Structure formats: structure tokens, C-alpha cells
Image: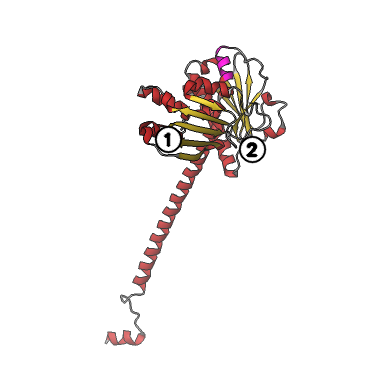
């Protein structure tokens, strides 16, 4: 199984190149899109080559998702805590984007290792912003408390017009994903993959992992949720997260894994589909080769039968030969 990486490789490469190039950089004005429709607008100007303006557009939130001023709950505080003086939030953001930041590269640490850590963190802005409410709830779970002023069921956006749900309690957080796919083949493969995923969790080697369940119908935690939000054609996946899963450094890994679970499943579904197509093509090629060999053998036999090696004698010829 392959886990998706948090930093945007494209964004991280641009940041590193700009740090290395110093004041010799060129104007940059480019757009890039990542999975689940997260879009970036990256701008550098020669007038101020050490300042990057980064705008981020998040997936379109469904009606049930919790937002604060158009952003996930706690996103602004998360940005300030993650980047400190290196990043300044611009208000209002650029048109068609949810957050715009001015990143001052002159304020990066002088130590190369620490600088790379900060650059990697900047390239992980998707996790910082979208994962802010999830991190808030799980941080309270680590201290075995419930975040104040939070509903019994919280909907968080993770894909365009799609949410996943959290039911926070002092001793555990239940996370439920309605799994939706567009392609009929993807639906079949995803359903099979998720059922095997649940079975794999039951092995002894994964005893410490969060418990995992799959159901074709909504679990009880989603009782009362709008029917449109429960329109899932590949069932529902439920994880139960306990305090031991979010202790110390485990918190960031758990947040990212939960935030990108649907993308993780989609990735492996597409890989499985590609693998099966490859096997099918190889099988067809082997059958064609077998047919070509059979055709070649038949042509050789035909030439042998109709060649000059055989001649039928008439009765007259047979009598002359007896004399």
C-alpha cells in the first residue's frame, strides 16, 4: 500500500529553487491543481524576488460542512501557528481563492536542515488548512476531553461537495466516510477493496491500528443527517480513533491519513484497474502469438501437401510400369 505525501512536490520544488537562486530568479505566475480539486496560484516578482504570494482554493464545501469565514474551523490560527513570522495572511484573498498568503523567504532559518523543514511545512499548506478542524478535535482527544462549542456530529469537507463525519467523545472519536465513486467499475473495485481493507485490519500485526468497519448502509452515528450527504454507492467506512492513536508525533500522521482516506482508496482502485488492464493486454498478446504460430504451421503443411513430392498414377501408367 502506498500513502500519499503531504507536501506538494511542485510547490516544494519551486520554493527550493527560489531559495537556491537567490536574487537571480525570474518572474513566476503559475497555477497547479492537486487531487480532490485543491488549486494553487504561485507568484514571484523580480521587484521582490524573496517574497512569494501563494493563493489556495479548497474543494467546494457541501451545505453540512462547518466553515468559519469561508475556511475550515481554526484554519487561520493553524496557519499562524505553523508558519509564524514567515507567512502573512492577506485579507481579502485573491478572487476565486479561499486564502492568500505572502511568504517572506528572508525570514527562513539560516540552518539548511531547519530551512528545509519550514519549506516542507509551507508545501504542506493543504494539510494545515483542511486538517485544522480535524487536528483540533483530535488534540482534545489526546487529553481525553471534548472541544468546547462543538456539535455531537461534525461534518468536514475533504472533496468537492463531499464531507466526512466525526462524532467526538472524551475517550474516542468516531470517523465515518460515505464512499462515492463516479465510474461503475470503480464502484465494484472500491467495494471489494474496502471489504478486504476491513478484513486486513483484523490481523494480529494491526492490533494497535484504529478499528475499522464497512457497511452498505449508514451507521447509527449518521442518524438525522441530510439524505443527500448520505448518498454513497460504495458503502460507509467507519474508524474509531482512541487517545493512543494521536499521542505526540502520531497526531499529524493520523490527521493526514484521515483527511486523505478517500484519495488513498481512489488511488489504489485506479492502480488495481490499471494492473488488470495490463494483465488482460498481455493475455490477449499471448493468444495472438499462439494463433500466429498455429497459422504458420498450417501454411507449412498446406505447402507440403500441394508440392511436387506426390503424383497420382493412372491405370495406364500403372500397367506400363509393370511391363
Q: Is residue 180 above or below residue 304?
A: above
What x and y, as percent, mark residue 288?
A: 43, 57
Whether residue 320 is in magenta: the answer is no
Point 49% across, 36% down: residue = 42
Alpha carbon of mark 2 to alpha carbon of mark 1: how far? 39 Å
Q: Residue at x 38, y 33 (%)?
A: 23
Count of marks placed on residues = 2
Labels 2, 1: front one: 1
Image height check: is 222 above or below 41? Answer: above
Expressed as whole percent of the image width and height from the top left, the position of residue 183 reads 59, 44
Asked whether the residues under the numbered discs 2 and 1 touch, taking CB atoms below 8 Å apart as contact, a structural biologist would say no
Residue underneath mark 1: 14
Tell me the crowding category of disc 2: few under 14, some 14 to 19, or many 20 or more residues within 10 angstroms, Cα based. some
Query: Which SS type dominates the magenta stretch?
Result: helix
Tag 1 secondary structure: helix
Secondary structure of residue under mark 2: loop
Image-based side of 112 in relation to 68, left or right: left
Residue 59 appears in the picture as rendered: yes
Residue span colored magenta: 136-144
Tell me which corner region of the image, top left, top right, bottom left or bottom right, holds residue 134.
top right
Where the C terminus falls, by quadrant?
bottom left
In the figure, 296 relative to 92: above or below? below
Q: Quadrant of residue 97?
A: top right
Residue drawn at the location 52% of the way across and 36% of the way down:
40
Q: Out of 285 and 271, give the one closest to the viewer.
A: 271
Mark earlier in primary sequence (2, 1): 1
Instruction: Name the quadrant containing residue 293.
Output: bottom left
Q: Position of residue 229 (x, y in %)?
A: 68, 32
The residue that mark 2 highlights is 233
* Residue closest to the eye, 133 or 237: 133
Using the image, tell me which numbered label, if any, was put on residue 114: none
Amino acid at each position: 500500500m502506498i500513502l500519499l505525501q503531504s507536501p506538494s512536490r511542485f510547490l516544494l520544488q519551486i520554493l527550493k529553487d527560489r531559495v537556491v537562486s537567490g536574487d537571480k530568479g525570474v518572474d513566476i505566475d503559475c497555477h497547479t491543481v492537486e487531487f480532490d480539486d485543491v488549486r494553487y496560484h504561485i507568484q514571484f516578482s523580480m521587484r521582490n524576488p524573496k517574497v512569494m504570494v501563494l493563493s489556495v482554493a479548497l474543494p467546494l464545501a457541501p451545505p453540512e460542512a462547518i466553515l468559519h469565514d469561508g475556511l475550515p474551523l481554526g484554519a487561520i490560527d493553524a496557519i499562524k501557528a505553523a508558519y509564524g513570522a514567515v507567512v502573512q495572511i492577506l485579507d481579502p484573498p485573491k478572487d476565486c481563492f479561499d486564502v492568500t498568503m505572502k511568504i517572506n523567504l528572508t525570514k527562513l532559518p539560516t540552518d539548511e536542515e531547519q530551512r528545509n523543514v519550514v519549506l516542507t511545512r509551507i508545501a504542506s499548506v493543504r494539510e494545515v488548512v483542511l486538517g485544522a478542524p480535524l487536528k483540533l478535535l483530535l488534540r482534545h482527544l489526546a487529553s481525553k476531553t471534548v472541544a468546547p462549542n462543538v456539535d455531537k456530529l461534525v461534518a468536514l469537507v475533504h472533496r468537492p461537495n463531499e464531507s466526512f463525519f466525526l462524532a467526538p467523545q472524551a475517550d474516542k472519536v468516531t470517523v465515518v466516510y460515505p464512499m462515492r465513486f463516479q465510474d461503475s467499475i470503480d464502484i465494484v473495485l472500491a467495494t471489494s477493496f474496502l471489504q478486504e481493507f476491513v478484513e486486513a485490519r483484523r490481523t494480529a500485526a494491526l492490533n494497535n491500528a484504529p478499528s475499522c468497519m464497512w457497511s452498505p448502509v449508514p451507521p447509527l452515528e449518521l442518524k438525522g443527517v441530510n439524505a443527500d450527504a448520505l448518498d454513497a454507492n460504495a458503502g460507509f467506512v467507519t474508524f474509531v480513533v482512541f487517545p493512543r492513536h494521536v499521542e505526540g508525533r502520531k497526531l499529524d500522521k493520523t490527521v493526514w491519513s484521515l483527511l486523505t482516506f478517500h484519495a488513498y482508496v481512489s488511488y489504489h482502485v485506479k492502480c488495481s484497474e490499471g494492473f488488470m488492464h495490463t494483465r488482460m493486454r498481455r493475455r490477449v498478446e499471448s493468444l495472438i502469438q499462439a494463433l500466429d504460430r498455429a497459422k504458420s504451421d498450417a501454411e507449412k503443411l498446406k505447402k507440403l501437401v500441394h508440392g511436387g513430392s506426390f503424383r497420382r498414377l493412372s491405370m495406364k501408367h500403372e500397367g506400363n510400369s509393370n511391363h
